[in-house]
Image (tube, grey):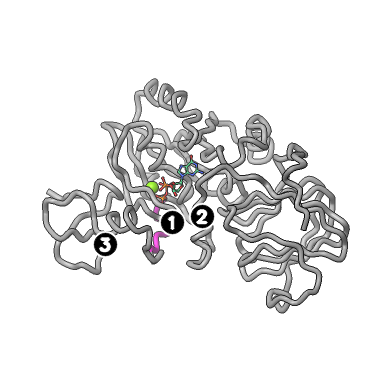
């Protein structure tokens, strides 16, 4: 019988240490990669799984898709994959601890309904804050069908399943921790996550690790100042503007005045931004922009940038968060 890794679903093998699924002896239940992800979180992200293959594999199944999307994955590309899944779906917005203090959940729900035409049931959860999990479990237990957890990679699918069913699924901030279907309960499966067309490069993966709720950074900028988000981009607005940045605390965010940064040598993205928009760096951060403006964005990661209507809508007014830089 083929034995699969209890952490990530990959077929286990004892022959080749450099291939996926390696275990040093047949008694082991977790592959070497899961062991190292759990204990060291030091893996190179060299997994190449195509979204179309994932979606095709899912399409062969009958049941309900629980699509997990964390708060940094709310964007057009995510929902274009969501729409390709034709089986019945439930949308789960995860990691709401990251923004909960600052944004009303019904604003996000309305945003999903109005901008992405989501007609399916929506749940909000946080594993870290034990929020919404009881509701989700009650709902799952009321269903008499097979359930597949899918969605964007790193959105917290395996963490939610561990929290609900006390399983030892491997969890890490490395994209594509889960590699295949993993049976969690008789009728419940974890599954491999979807990636953006341009996935996050290796040097940015460290910013995926977020361990506590985020205090957004409010950055009022005069015309002569630009906003530098270290390692990601420089944003130059044509008018005085206020940017509210929701990002991992490990990202350095500051104003710059002298145009002396290597990013200025890049061809900028030029975008007309309507008032009350979110500038999204997919999977990593979003920035609420208050005023209608014209932006120049200097970044090596243009494909990861999206502008969307904001669901923040002036909710963030905590004076203490104002930057004095
Ligand atoms: N802030 C926050 N982080 C969470 C929460 N749940 C999980 N995480 C973190 O999110 C990261 C990814 O979690 P996983 O459960 O491995 O995500 P996944 O969707 O299964 O990821 P893949 O299997 O790689 O597609 C880990 O670093 C978790 O600690 C949560 O409720 N809040
Ligand atoms: Mg997983």
Name the residue that disc number 2 marks.
208
Residue that appears at 53% across and 29% down: 121
- Please provide the residue range marked out in magenta: 47-54
Q: Are marks 1 and 2 in contact (CB under 8 Å)?
A: yes
- Front residue of 38/69: it is 38
Whether 24 is drawn above or below 263: the answer is above
Q: Residues within 10 Å of mark 1 (few under 14, many from 20)?
A: many
Name the residue that disc number 3 marks.
20
In the image, which is nearer the foreground, mark 2 or mark 3? Answer: 2
Whether 146 is drawn above or below 72: the answer is above
Distance from the alpha carbon under mark 1 to that under mark 3: 15 Å
Q: Is residue 319 left or right of residue 177?
A: right
Q: Residues within 10 Å of mark 3 (few under 14, many from 20)?
A: some
Q: Secondary structure at mark 2?
A: helix
Q: Secondary structure at mark 3?
A: loop
Q: Secondary structure at mark 1?
A: loop
Q: Position of residue 167 (x, y in %)?
A: 29, 37
Q: Is residue 314 left or right of residue 69?
A: right
Q: Position of residue 161 (x, y in %)?
A: 37, 37
Name the residue that disc number 1 marks.
175
Q: Is mark 1 within 8 Å of ligand 1?
A: yes
Q: Are marks 2 and 3 in contact (CB under 8 Å)?
A: no
Distance from the alpha carbon under mark 2 to that under mark 3: 23 Å
Q: Is residue 201 left or right of residue 304?
A: left
């Amino acid at each position: 019988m083929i034995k699969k890794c209890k952490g990530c679903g990959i077929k286990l093998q004892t022959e080749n240490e450099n291939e996926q699924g390696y275990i040093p002896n047949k008694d082991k239940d977790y592959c070497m990669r899961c062991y190292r992800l759990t204990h060291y979180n030091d893996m190179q992200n060299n997994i190449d799984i195509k979204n179309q293959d994932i979606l095709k594999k899912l399409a062969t199944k009958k049941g309900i898709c629980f699509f997990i999307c964390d708060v940094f994955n709310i964007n057009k590309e995510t929902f274009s994959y969501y729409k390709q899944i034709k089986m019945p779906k439930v949308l789960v917005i995860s990691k709401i601890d990251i923004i909960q203090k600052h944004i009303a959940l019904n604003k996000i729900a309305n945003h999903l309904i109005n901008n992405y035409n989501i007609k399916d049931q929506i749940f909000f959860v946080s594993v870290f804050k034990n929020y919404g999990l009881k509701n989700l479990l009650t709902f799952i237990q009321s269903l008499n069908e097979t359930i597949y957890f899918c969605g964007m990679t790193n959105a917290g699918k395996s963490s939610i399943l561990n929290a609900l069913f006390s399983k030892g699924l491997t969890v890490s901030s490395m994209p594509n921790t889960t590699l295949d279907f993993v049976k969690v309960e008789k009728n419940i499966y974890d599954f491999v996550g979807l990636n953006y067309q341009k996935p996050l490069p290796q040097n940015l993966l460290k910013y995926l690790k977020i361990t506590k709720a985020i205090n957004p950074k409010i950055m009022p900028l005069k015309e002569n100042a630009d906003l530098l988000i270290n390692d990601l981009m420089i944003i130059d607005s044509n008018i005085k503007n206020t940017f509210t940045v929701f990002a991992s605390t490990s990202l350095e965010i500051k104003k710059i005045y002298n145009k002396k940064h290597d990013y200025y040598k890049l061809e900028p993205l030029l975008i007309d931004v309507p008032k009350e928009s979110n500038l999204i760096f997919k999977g990593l951060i979003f920035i609420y922009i208050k005023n209608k403006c014209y932006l120049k964005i200097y970044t090596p990661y243009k494909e990861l940038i999206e502008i969307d209507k904001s669901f923040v809508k002036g909710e963030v007014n905590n004076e203490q968060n104002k930057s004095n830089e």
